[in-house]
Amino acid sequence: QVQLVESGGGSVLAGGSLRLSCAASGYTSSRYCMGWFRQTPTKEREGVATLDSDTTTRVADSVKGRFTISKDAAKNTLYLQMNSLKPEDTAMYYCAAGPSLGLGICPLQPIVYNYWGQGTQVTVSS
């Protein structure tokens, strides 16, 4: 059974930083996509950053240069380092995992991912 457990959310002032963590267990495939997504009550879930089993990353234009996705394979943990946070980054952040599509890069579309964590709230105030 695949489990994804996020942590690290919180409230920060604009310009601050947070690091989200996603502890993964039960995913047995050696080829996979993992990613971070976010959603607000008024917007659809959107992809923030993805990483494949070869550590190729993809980052949404809205966070490029500010957010970095990485993983610690030994700890089975995915991270999202968020710097220079803006109020518009306020959202529930979700970790997700799914099969590799063999594209050499993992898509930002949520529909590709079939395992999801429970989410961690990030609130950025001005």
Image (cartoon, rainbow, N blue to C red):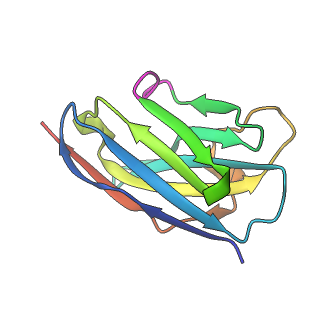
Image coordinates of residue 125 in percent, x first then y, are 15, 42
Question: Residue 89 lies in magenta, yes or no?
Answer: no
Quadrant that contains the C terminus: top left
Q: Is residue 16 above or below residue 111?
A: above
Q: Going by the picture, which residue comes out furthest to the left? A: 126
Q: Going by the picture, which residue comes out furthest to the right? A: 102
Q: Going by the picture, which residue comes out furthest to the bottom? A: 1
Image coordinates of residue 49 in percent, x first then y, are 55, 38
Name the residue: 54% across, 56% down. Answer: 95
Query: Is residue 91 at all visible to an observer of this figure?
Result: yes
Q: Which residues are magenta?
A: 61-66
Quadrant that contains the N terminus: bottom right
Residue 42 appears left or right of 36: left
Task: Name the magenta segment's main secondary structure.
Answer: loop
Query: Is residue 76 at all visible to an observer of this figure?
Result: no
Q: Quadrant of residue 115?
A: bottom right
Name the residue: 62% across, 31% down. Answer: 58
Q: Going by the picture, which residue comes out furthest to the front? A: 74
Report the front residue among 40 and 93.
93
